[in-house]
Amino acid sequence: MTTQDAARTLDQSGSLDPGFGDNQNGTILLQGTKVEAIAVLKAEGANQGKIIGAISNGSSAFTLFRLDKTGLLDRSFGPDGTGYATGRFGADTTLPTVRTLTIIDNGSILVTGDVRQSSLGPHYPAAALFNSNGTPNLVFGTFRFEEAPPTLPVESSVPIPLNDAEAKAGKILFAVNNSSPGPYRNWGLLIQLTLNGELDKDLDGRGYVYFRHNNENTTTVGAVTQTDGTIVLAGYTSSHAFLAGFTSNGKIDPTFGTGGIKTFESPEGAIRLSKVLAQPDNKLIAVGTVTKSPQRGWVTRTLSNGTSDNTFNNGNEFITQFPFRSLQWNSADIDSKGSIVVAGEIDQRLCIVGRITEDGRVDTTFTPTGLSDPNAADTPNVTTSVAVQSDARIIVAGIKTDASVSGYVG
């Protein structure tokens, strides 16, 4: 285990970038309560490097926005020249909660989360697709999951025989938590849709897979698709964090980990995962928090088949701690050098950004400690999402009194 300690630093790298935003303090404040998720446009062209995000408003709609590379509203986005667009998961009377935002291959914007009919109603998994200019994709429409539970849900203790299938293009895959009423409440849920917003029955014959680990309430935080089409689902229970391997058609892959599961345990305490990333070589990065007080950031990497990667910190977990205070990692991304960029909070009230080298060490080219200074002036308060814009800039979303996006010097 490697431990990373934090201390103040005045180095430019790791500090808020005064060239980002509208007030020379590295941050732009936006309309709404909280920026829930962001993504940086990677495809070559005029929009490369621009930032797409989704804001919660506590109402029946959420807000999409687009910033230019310097953190100013891009007024070519949206229907009214403001840089904003309105999104919903259903009728005007429904209440949405945004969880993720993803740019899919054709530049469309996928927003996932859950939706309720009323403030006291159950949550149903939901998704909406938007065109690259922020207008709704009318072919996809909106998706709300209310399918009847399958008769044979997947439990991590019961491996299913491997059935090979080729990966297919034009699929939308995402993971959610099933909190809707029924016998599979508090199970993880993997959903695959077609581009017209329908369940894709290539995934386990239904378009969805319920999943529970170790017969416990299970929280799933994300899923990635590897280059051969296999799927890795990430999540945690009260006792373990895990990665679960699936074939491209939604069956547990017994060649992944042990019987399809890679379980994470730490001598430091229980692990709450927040993010899973797949490198170009299909190695898997798991990011989260050790929940035992004081909380500490936690990162590890496995090979593509879920076995330990000895080239990352000698096969050990990487722990980040902040003396006498709690630290949690909420999000992560990978930069062009293969370094892992993580972002979270100190004591749930101050943003902190860190960078770990590809081989699992403190990245002292970022700052001497590999961490930003959470006590610096103008530091945001809440961190929800991080994305690498370039080698020179890291984008962090969340709250600084209002919904905010900040740029940190890379």
Image: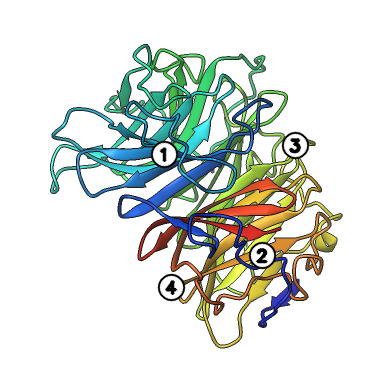
Q: How much space separates mark 3 and mark 4, taking CA atoms?
A: 34 Å
**Sequence order check, earlier mark of 4 and 2:** 4
- Judge from the rendering whether residue 180 lies leftward or rightward of residue 344; answer left or right: left
Image quarter where the C terminus lies is bottom right
C-alpha span from label 1 to label 4: 24 Å
| Residue that badge 4 annotates | 349
Quick one: label 3 or label 4, which is nearer the N terminus? 3
Element carrying mark 2: strand
Quadrant where the N terminus lies? bottom right
Depth check, mark 2 against mark 1: the one in front is 1
Q: Which residue is mark 2?
A: 354
Colouring scheme applied when the structure was drawn: rainbow
Q: Is residue 254 left or right of residue 296?
A: right
Q: Secondary structure at mark 3?
A: loop
Q: Where 337 falls versus 163 (above or below)?
A: below
Q: From the top left corner, tell me how far across and down residue 159 is, in percent.
A: 58, 34
Kind of residue at badge 2: Gly
> The disc labelled 1 sits on which kind of residue?
Phe
Percent x, y for residue 248?
61, 22
Q: Position of residue 167 (x, y in %)?
A: 65, 17
Residue drawn 25% across and 38% down?
61
Question: Where is 137 relative to 269, above or below?
Answer: above
The kind of secondary structure element at disc 1 is strand
Residue identifier under label 3: 282
Q: Which residue is mark 1?
A: 65
Camera-side residue of 72 and 140? 72
Tell me the amino acid under the disc marked 3: Asn
